[in-house]
Amino acid sequence: MSLIRSSLLVGLGSVTSRILGFVRDVLFAQALGTGPVADAFLAAFRLPNLVRRILGEGGLNPALVPALSRLESDEGAKVAGDVLGAFALALLALTGFVEIGAGLLAFLLAPGLHDDAGTLALVALYTRLSFPIVLCVTLASIAAAVLNWRGRFTATALAPLAVNGGLILALVVLESGFDLPLARKAAWLAAASSLAGLIQLAIVAAALLQGGSRLVRFRRPRWSPLLKSLLLAGLPVLAASGAVQIFFLAATQIASFWPSGISWLYYAERVIQLPLGLMAGLSASLLLPELARRHQAGERQALVTAQNRALEVALLLALPAASALFILARPISTVLFERGAFASTDAEGTALVLMALSLGMPFATLAKVLSQTLFALGSLRAALAAAGIGLVVTVTASLLLAWPLGLTGIALGVSLGCVSHAGAVILGLSRFGLWSPGWQGLSRLARTAVATLVMSLGLLSAGSLFPEPEPLVLAAFCLGGLVLYALAAFATGALTRDDWASLTKKSSEPLRPGAGLS
């Protein structure tokens, strides 16, 4: 499959999943609003959804793909089966511990609710009902990594749609056919998320088993040095590859001390995750295997070139998206969420948080793309250190800014965490001698910035004519901004016809040990 077809397939799956996630969260806001029940549900949903997002963006790929790339085909199939079996046993044990200790976990997720025993009890209940999704999506992610390693992307791109699609179906059914109290309605949604995760696992497992023993070979897991390293690296890899998600988890804990803080931060983050999640998914699914192959073949300059090219494309998308979200934050929050139990004051608060988060989005994208090089090198320590620095800055800045600025200050703390994370990743690459953006990259960045400025001025002008746009007007803003940016990008040279031609070359097959690239 050509690189452009693979990119389009993975990108289409990511975009569709994010759009369904948007629809899901709009229905969440309509059904649950921003009161105590909503805060309890979203606090409980935060942890499994965090794991699902990290894994859905290829969170385990950094540990699995480079390791599998160093093995012969038959040995790789055996190791893949060992990893699936070992992780299944470990996750079953973890799920059991969570079911037993959900009360303590609820306090850790939302410490600001310590004086509200009833709401904390709801957090514990919803955690017990929704946490089994972690078992399902983790195993699905491991299977997806094996499929990506073999150059198969269809099932891995489409399977994640099951979770959001299942929750949308559950919301529609609950809203149309039943008149349930909010607390019970949220309980059904938590249970539905676990069932949807099981469906996702079934889809990926079917695709994996279709490949027979060539893709995976099951046996009683053998405790090998490789399996040990993968198991021990699992949690650090998730922490490093899902750094931004962990920043939001920490911010949610701080936001729990403010009324409706969990809800406002959650809904604003969901808007940010549409473009950010797309780039993260493409990076882990497509860029990482390519970088791993280059590193395995000893092609250092080719690795740097691939990294820089991916960064140019990522910023080509991230800069205009961040600018548009900042300018359109208020109409987006109003049009998407202000209905049912979601009041106008909630939309205003969510908009302010969204504006603050949009400032850090380009840096989050930069860090996500560049981290793939560290993963390809097997330098988990550097990636984890960068994530740790970002987390420390997030917590410190959020606490310092929260008191004068409230939830907006917490969101600014997350953005500052993304900036520091990106800087730490660049520092790590510099130590390996792999940070060399070059004149071409800097020139492309400047042209992208000019095109983004043109689009921003156009959106500001249109916004002055329609200060309170309706859904159709907002859609016209988005489409018009996209067209204006595309024209400006071609005019400035930020986007060229050669960019499309360079994507049509064939992607490489998995490398054999010691083999070079064709």
Image: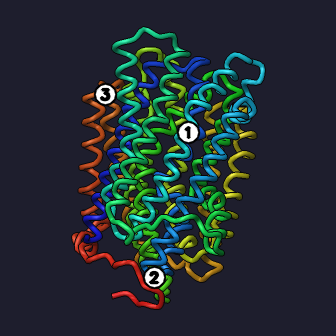
- Can see residue 370? yes
Type of residue at label 1? Pro
Q: Residue furthest right?
A: 115
Q: Is mark 3 on a helix, strand or loop?
A: loop
Q: Mark 3 points at which residue?
A: 466
Q: Name the residue under label 1.
A: 132
Q: Which residue is drawn at 48% across and 78% down?
A: 75
Observer-nearest residue: 362 or 104? 104
Observer-nearest residue: 485 or 298? 298
Q: Residue at x 30, y 36 (%)?
A: 462
- Can see residue 420? no
Type of residue at label 3? Phe
The answer for how far apart the CA atoms under marks 3 and 1 are is: 46 Å
Indicate the position of residue 160 as horizontal and vertical percent values.
39, 47
User: Would you identify the image quadrant in which residue 506 lies?
Assistant: bottom left
| Horizontal side of residue 65 vs 39, given as left or right | left
Q: Is mark 2 on a helix, strand or loop?
A: loop
Q: Residue at x 36, y 32 (%)?
A: 23
| Horizontal side of residue 399 vs 227, given as left or right | right
If you read the primary sequence from the N terminus, does the residue marked by circle 2 or circle 1 appear first?
A: 2
Observer-nearest residue: 452 or 68? 68
Observer-nearest residue: 232 or 506? 232
